[in-house]
Image (tube, rainbow, N blue to C red):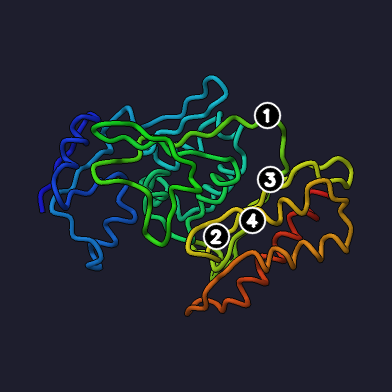
Amino acid sequence: MRYVRVETVSEILDGLQEDGARLLAGGTDLIVKMRSGLAAPTLLIDVSGVASLQGVVEADGVIEIGATTPEEDLLASPVLRDRLPLLTAVLRVLGSVQIRTRGTLGGNLVNASPAADSAVPLLLYDAEVVLVGRERQRVLPVERFLLGPGKTDLEPGEFVRAVRVPTPQEPFAPFFHKVGKRRALTIAIASVGGLIRLKGKRVLEARFAAGSVAPVPLRLRQVEEALRGAILGEETLRATAQLAKDSVSPISDVRASADYRRSVVGSLVARALRSALA
């Protein structure tokens, strides 16, 4: 295996022409896979020094996040703290300080884990990924970028340059909770994020997404549609919880059963709504 550290987008695109080339940003996922034999790149392209892939900029109603910006730097961003509080809340419980110092938002998306915490708020904020290849640049919603466990819509020779999020125009009550085997450094058995706007007990808008309960993190569109304009009471909460349970298709594995995961999703959606009411 060869290793090269690059400084420009042009050098990245040149390196990606080689079969077996992989990008290295933080390495918190890739290095683990290499050590376990799940990845064996012939060329490792270190992109951590490419300045144009880092930073947070807000302009013309869009927040652009450089794909290789370390997660700890994102937590320190006043733009994200003020405009996208759910994203910063989720990043705060992602891994440890050591992992967040190295890990990146782009890398977390490209890894495409069904349990990827950062994907949940990005789905709720209608985020897009900016994909760059030698011939063109594409912009895809995160919802279409993630295809399955470890699978994305990246084409050969492409890489993720940035994540774009439309600046929210209305204030939302944010919610995120994940259930795991331990309090820290846990991989979610199931997680739910929410962005909720109420007027009294009436739902003006509710967005929900869940992780670890399908091949990819997903928006709970049926739940959102059912809640539009609804008056929140105990009957509505029970019906919504059941609908949320029916909207996911988890598997049973060594960490939890499918039935338990479904129950967690239903309970967390109801908890999010109660929290917004309070």
Residue 143, x across and y down, in percent: 51, 48
Disc 4 marks which residue?
220
Disc 3 marks which residue?
195
Label whose residue precedes the other's in the sequence (2 or 3): 3
Spatial separation of the CA atoms under disc 1 and disc 3:
13 Å
Spatial separation of the CA atoms under disc 4 and disc 1:
21 Å
Q: Circle 4 — which element?
A: loop
Residue 80, x across and y down, in percent: 55, 34
Q: Circle 2 — which element?
A: strand
Contact check, label 2 and label 1, Cβ < 8 Å: no
Q: Identify the residue at horizontal 57%, vertical 23% (top origin).
A: 61
Spatial separation of the CA atoms under disc 4 and disc 3:
12 Å
Identify which amino acid the numbered label 2 is placed on. Answer: Gly
Q: Identify the residue at horizontal 48%, vertical 45% (top origin).
A: 142
The number of numbered badges drawn on the structure is 4
Disc 1 marks which residue?
169
Residue 278, x across and y down, in percent: 84, 50
Position above or below: 212 against 49: below
Label whose residue precedes the other's in the sequence (1 or 3): 1
Q: Circle 1 — which element?
A: loop
Contact check, label 4 and label 1, Cβ < 8 Å: no
Spatial separation of the CA atoms under disc 2 and disc 1:
26 Å
The quarter of the displayed image where residue 1 is located: bottom left
